Image: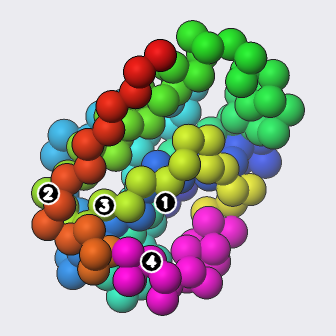
Amino acid sequence: MSTWHMADACYVYCVIASPRPPRRVRVSRGLPGTGGVRLLDADRGLYLAVADAPLSQYGETAINRGLSNLEWVSRAAVAHERVVESFNGSGAVLPMKLFTVFRSDTRALDHIRSQRKRLAAVAKRVAGHDEWSVRVV
């Protein structure tokens, strides 16, 4: 159960399509200032890897302010990617965009459930594959 507070939001790292709950053995620490990574069951084989995130650091105003700081964005991106990668081998892993934040677990779950058909198609397409990316700056 979450220890959600009014000053917290639900940060979503990824959606995992798996017939059983994903393994949580080597889940990396998430973004600075967020709570521990936890799983939400979105029903019928979809799980969300999420963390409680203080709105003071990950609300819209704070994110918009932070986007001008490349070091802050880079730290967040690396931490986000580490969490996503920690679920490789747990089913089809669908990374969410950096700074995907919902006001509550319920809103995150409602959004994912409303996208179930599209997510199932994407999960089928990427099942058994690993994501690789290269960024040149």
Q: Main secondary structure of the magenta part?
A: helix
Question: Do residues under tags 4 and 1 come within 8 Å of each other at their CB atoms?
Answer: no
Residue farthest toward the front in the current orientation of the protein: 136
Counting residues from the start of the chain, the first of labels 3 and 4 encountered is: 3
Residues under numbered marks 2 and 4 in contact, where contact means CB atoms less than 8 Å apart: no
What residue sits right under mark 4 in the picture?
119
Q: Is residue 85 left or right of residue 60?
A: left
**What residue sits 44% from the left and 77% below the top?**
119
Across and down, in percent, residue 16 comes to: 33, 66
Q: Nearer the viewer, residue 48 or 123?
A: 123
Mark 2, residue position:
89
Dot 1 crowding, Cα within 10 Å, few <14, some 14–19, many 20+: few
Q: Which residues are magenta?
A: 106-122
**Label 1: which residue?**
1
* Badge 3 vs badge 2, beta-carbon distance below 8 Å: no
Question: Judging from the image, what secondary structure is the residue with disc 1 in?
Answer: loop
- Around disc 2, counting alpha carbons within 10 Å, would you say few (fewer than 14), some (14 to 19), or many (20 or more)? some
If you read the primary sequence from the N terminus, does the residue marked by circle 4 or circle 1 appear first? Answer: 1
Amino acid bearing label 4: Leu
Residue 69 relative to residue 19: left or right: right
Q: Give amino acid for label 1.
A: Met
Residue 90 visible in image: yes
Residue 122 x/y as whole percent: 38, 75
Q: Quadrant of residue 45?
A: bottom left
Q: Label 3 vs label 2: CA separation?
A: 8 Å
Secondary structure beneath dot 3 equals strand
Most foreground residue, 55 or 14: 14
Residue under the image location 70 percent in, 43 percent down: 8
Q: CA distance from mark 4 to mark 1?
A: 25 Å
